[in-house]
Image: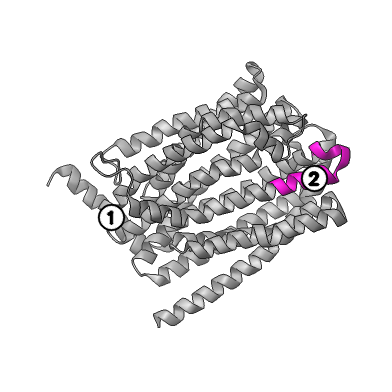
Amino acid sequence: MSSSTSSTISSTSNQENALGSKSIGKLLLQYSVPAIIAMVATSLYNIIDSIFIGHGVGPLAIAGLAITFPLMNLVIAFCTLVAVGGATISSIFLGQKNLPRATDVVNNVFTLCLIHSVIFGGLTLIFLDDILLFFGATPETLPFARDFMTVILYGTPISYVFIGLNNLMRATGYPRKAMISALISVICNVALAPLFIFKFGWGIKGAAFATVCSQFVAFVWVLSHFISRKSLIHFKIRNRWLTGGIIKRIYAIGLSPFLMNVCSCVVVIFINKALLSNAGDDGNLAVGAYGILNRTAMFFVMIVFGVAQGMQPILGYNYGAGQWSRVKRTLRFGIITGACITTVGCAICELFPSAVAGLFTNDTELTDLAQNAFRVYFVCYAVVGIQVIIQNFFQSIGKPKLSIFLSLTRQLLFLLPLLIFLPKLLGVNGVWISMTASDFIAFIVAVATLIFMLRRNNKLTH
């Protein structure tokens, strides 16, 4: 046996022993802190773009950027379908001590990411204007939305492979390296965005170029990890690059975040159209206010997603190994942490809405609209973290149907009906109330589903 093979086996054994025996608190710190930093970095990506666009291009550019949110959700949907599914099953395979099968996942994720990016990106570019107009673009905001999305869509092969492999890196025992790749991307974006927007005068297109260029740098970093034979899981040319059984499981588990993002796309379309039809002459600015609200709310949700991603390999391994008590302890830690994060977000945005909105724009009218949106929406925001953790818990233990159910109930069964009726009664405030009410109802349903599932499992294990 070669020394490199012995080293890999030893590394695998150490990681497995840690996931199955190390203190849950220490494991969550080890995996979640890098994941949180990575997710904060990803969220800062979006916030930085919005801030530079708002101050460097103007309030209509912020509205144009908000119009792209549904399409960006679709871009993310086709990526997370592969990335999350691949990360989850690789953790489960490692928990089952099936290293060859976990290695097969890498080749499949890489190939599927490329296929998805070429098909989705190509088709979307062909019909881009029609799609943006359907999503709520107006003659004033369409040029901004088109300029931004054209560059982003051309860069989807880079983005998809970067995100897909970065999720695998974290799930297979390299959370710090996954964090570094996200930080590399953000640091490059912070350096390039003001250069492209202000110095070169490229406007909103410059923000998109900065995003793609920074992701390319991180893409090279992540790809080098999986090419290296020193990595626990890496590319193997002789392995099959498309395996039916693995693809089926990737899609089955990745279907939950995929549908969540597709639903988000539909919901944002309804939100944009409701704002445009109920805000009168301020319709474009109301859409811009939603863009500011969305970026801010997602900042805290992304931190919770970081906790969920840190939990994922711990949950996946211990569930695969049949250590149910450790699964429940991990879940308990996650719920408490998620609740604390969104409670902080609630407090900041309720107490200082004008200051937060002012980060994105110096336009007084847009700031006032965003401030009002903050005060209404963030009332029940504290419970959002719990709902996110529970939904991701089911996904992490290979129960995608429950995760999909929780995703669909929040967005389709609760939010869409409220968006149809409340704005007609309450105007623009009806949009913000619909969002906060659906979050609270979804929280209740998620907690009830979790309690039912835990009680059922306890009966089966006793």
Residue 393 bears which disc, if any?
none
Q: Earlier in the sequence, mark 2 or mark 1?
A: 1
Taking the spot 44% from the left edge, 37% from the top edge, the residue there is: 162
Q: In this view, does 123 lie to the left or right of 269?
A: left
Q: In which quarter of the image is residue 317?
A: bottom left
- The picture places residue 37, in percent across and down from the top left corner, at 52, 44
Residue 174 included in the magenta stretch of the image: no
Note whether residue 379 is visible.
no
Element under disc 1: helix
Residue at image mark 2: 275
Distance of label 2 from label 1 (alpha carbons): 54 Å
Element under disc 2: helix
Q: Quadrant of residue 415?
A: bottom right
Taking the spot 61% from the left edge, 21% from the top edge, the residue there is: 196
In the rendered image, which quarter contains the C terminus?
A: bottom left
Note whether residue 363 is visible.
yes
Taking the spot 23% from the left edge, 47% from the top edge, the residue there is: 8
Up-down: is 137 above or below 167? above
Q: Nearer the viewer, residue 329 or 297?
A: 297
Q: Quadrant of residue 407?
A: bottom right
- The picture places residue 353, in percent across and down from the top left corner, at 77, 46
- Circle 2 Cα neighbour tier, 10 Å, few/some/many (<14 / 14–19 / ≥20): many
Q: Is residue 28 left or right of residue 5?
A: right
Residue 278 included in the magenta stretch of the image: yes
- Magenta highlight: main SS: helix
Mark toward the viewer: 2 or 1: 2
Residue at image mark 1: 14
Up-down: is 368 above or below 128? below
Q: Nearer the viewer, residue 111 or 244?
A: 244
CB contact under 8 Å: marks 2 and 1: no
- Colour scheme shown: one colour
Per the rendered image, the range of residues in magenta is: 269-285
